Image (cartoon, rainbow, N blue to C red):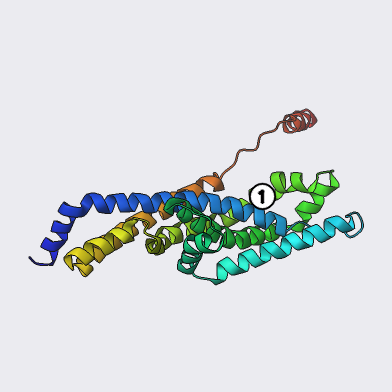
Amino acid sequence: MNFWERILYLLQEYGTSYLKGAGTTLVIALVSTAIGCLIGFIVGIIQTIPEDKQRDSLLKKIVLKIVKIILKIYVEVFRGTPMIVQAVFIYYGAAQIFNIQMGMWQSAFLIVSINTGAYMAESVRGGIISVDPGQTEGAKAIGMTHVQTMTNVILPQAFRNILPQIGNNLIINIKDTSVLSIISIVDLFFVHKSVAGALYTYFESAVIVMCMYLIMTLAASKLLRLWEKKMDGSQNYELVDVMGIGTQLGEEVKRGE
């Protein structure tokens, strides 16, 4: 058989296995990215909590400082080490050191989620800092608490700023779930290794898998671009005169004429 005939044979015999592997990859990437974003928002918000030297008690200052140090260590460790090492440490290390037995799926979601959370924490922190400080001051001036300021003023704007990074993390997770084959997760890359090892069709199987990864990442990128465009809203806005001030002024101008 020539090259294309071997690819066709692999698709006919193992097409279902490739699709199941791709499904596993997508489920892990989507769920873990969502959980990771939640972790990142929580960590990013805590890292940007301001310290009021006059009003905050000593206990609050100490607790906040300790929490920020712990979160800083978490971010630096999981951003500074490869996911494949984290997978080995969490899956095998948790059982040997802490006697915690986790299933492969639990480990997969945990590994990708906390890894994504570490990257998202810095993105969220940067997104919050990028919002004009005057808006925070204005919110406090009208009596808003820090939580109200974050939820109603800062985070909606920060979310739009970091939305491209969320999409970037999703695409990265679709590709990086391939490292989870080391803990026997049957994702797309695991299927590729199994098929290629059994039939010695490494290049042909790699071509199929590469195309499937590319389709998934392009589809994710396109959907996220549409989401960004929808959040931007229309370029032309119609001003609504809720108070009727414009109508009243118009009538006065007419009477003056």
The image shows residue 249 at horizontal and vertical percentages of 77, 32
**In the visual, does 134 lie left or right of 176?**
right
The quarter of the rendered structure image containing the N terminus is: bottom left
Residue at the outermost bottom position: 80
**In the visual, does 147 lie left or right of 225?**
right
Instruction: Check disc 1 and report the residue beneath it.
Output: 155
Q: Quadrant of residue 151?
A: top right
The image shows residue 67 at horizontal and vertical percentages of 73, 59
Name the residue: 44% across, 53% down.
29
Name the residue: 22% across, 68% down.
202
The image shows residue 206 at horizontal and vertical percentages of 26, 65
- The residue closer to the viewer here, 149 or 69, is 69
- The residue closer to the viewer here, 171 or 218, is 171
Q: Quadrant of residue 174?
A: bottom left
Q: Quadrant of residue 69?
A: bottom right
- The residue closer to the viewer here, 234 or 108, is 108
Name the residue: 76% across, 62% down.
66
Residue 32 in view (yes/no): yes
The amino acid type found where label 1 is placed reads: Leu
Is the residue 185 above or below the residue 201 in the image? above
Residue at the outermost right position: 54
